[in-house]
Image (cartoon, coloured by chain):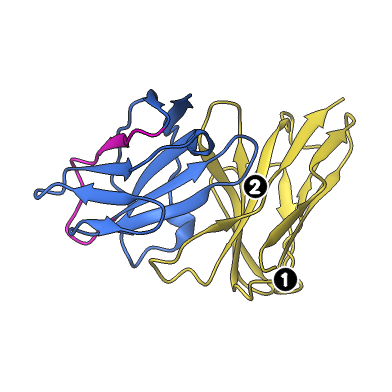
Amino acid sequence: DAKTTQPTSMDCAEGRAANLPCNHSTISGNEYVYWYRQIHSQGPQYIIHGLKNNETNEMASLIITEDRKSSTLILPHATLRDTAVYYCIVRTPFQGAQKLVFGQGTRLTINP
Amino acid sequence: DGGITQSPKYLFRKEGQNVTLSCEQNLNHDAMYWYRQDPGQGLRLIYYSQIVNDFQKGDIAEGYSVSREKKESFPLTVTSAQKNPTAFYLCASSTGTGGNEKLFFGSGTQLSVL
């Protein structure tokens, strides 16, 4: 899996959009970008994934740059319950889930 | 509700004691996984199983053992050989290991040494 780089921590005001960056400059052509989040003392939760096009679901939006070397996870209207550690992971569709590498992630704090 | 159940939520181990962490899933998933998480760190893979009666070592298998006698269950034993067992243990499952599947996690077990 390609290495990813994320900021250690970020803050965002409640009700504003939270934009979480991820660098994956060595990503290869068939690797997807996945995002999971982990609320304190719970298991990680899948958020979204994408290959090259921007993706949106009920939880978030994923914006991938044209060169695919970086991406941004957007939580459009952050709430206090979005306070969590967010993990950015890249993997090929042919690698099993055991190959997912959960690094230290970004600790996002939503402030009232 | 479908999901993954880990028990107990908190577990204490005495020196030299083996302890077993339970993981049960009713998602009909073929693959199951055990991860260890230390404070402020990411997840590290201990063992995984792609199918009943088969399992593979992950990155940090020493001092741990598993079994997969039933599709629904994947218990993890932390043996006395694991000298630093204090950590948060997470169990997960997925539909398979062929690619692009999502992981579903339990709520974890916090293991501490007395």
Residue A94, quarter of the rendered image:
bottom left
Q: Is residue B82 left or right of residue B91?
A: right
Q: Is B4 situated above or below A106?
A: below
User: How far across and down, in percent of the image, does residue B20 sit?
Assistant: 83, 49
Q: Name above or below for residue B66 compared with residue A42.
A: below
Under mark 2, the amino acid is Leu
Q: Nearer the viewer, residue A33 or A16?
A: A16
Question: In terms of image quadrants, where is residue B13?
Answer: top right
Q: Secondary structure at mark 1?
A: loop
Spot occupied by residue B41 in the image (x, y as percentages of width and height)? 52, 30
Q: Which structural element holds mark 2? A: strand
- What residue is rendered at 62% in x and 41% in y? B36
Query: Image point 68% across, 48% down: which residue?
Result: B107
The chain painted blue is A
Left or right of A6, for residue A66: left
What residue is disc 2 on? B90
**Which amino acid type is marked by label 1?**
Glu
Res B101 quadrant in image: bottom left
Q: CA distance from mark 1 to mark 2?
A: 16 Å
Is the stretch drawn in magenta largely helix, strand or loop? loop
Q: Nearer the viewer, residue B82 or B96?
A: B96
Most extreme residue toward the left, as rendered?
A66
A88 with respect to B90 (left or right): left
Numbered range of the magenta stretch: A15-32
Q: Are marks 1 and 2 in contact (CB under 8 Å)?
A: no
Chain letter of disc 1 in the image: B
Chain letter for mark 2: B
Q: What residue do we see at 68% from left, 60% from top?
A: B4
Lower sequence index among marks 1 and 2: 1
**Chain B hue?**
yellow
Q: Which residue is mark 1?
A: B72
**Is residue B53 highlighted in magenta?**
no
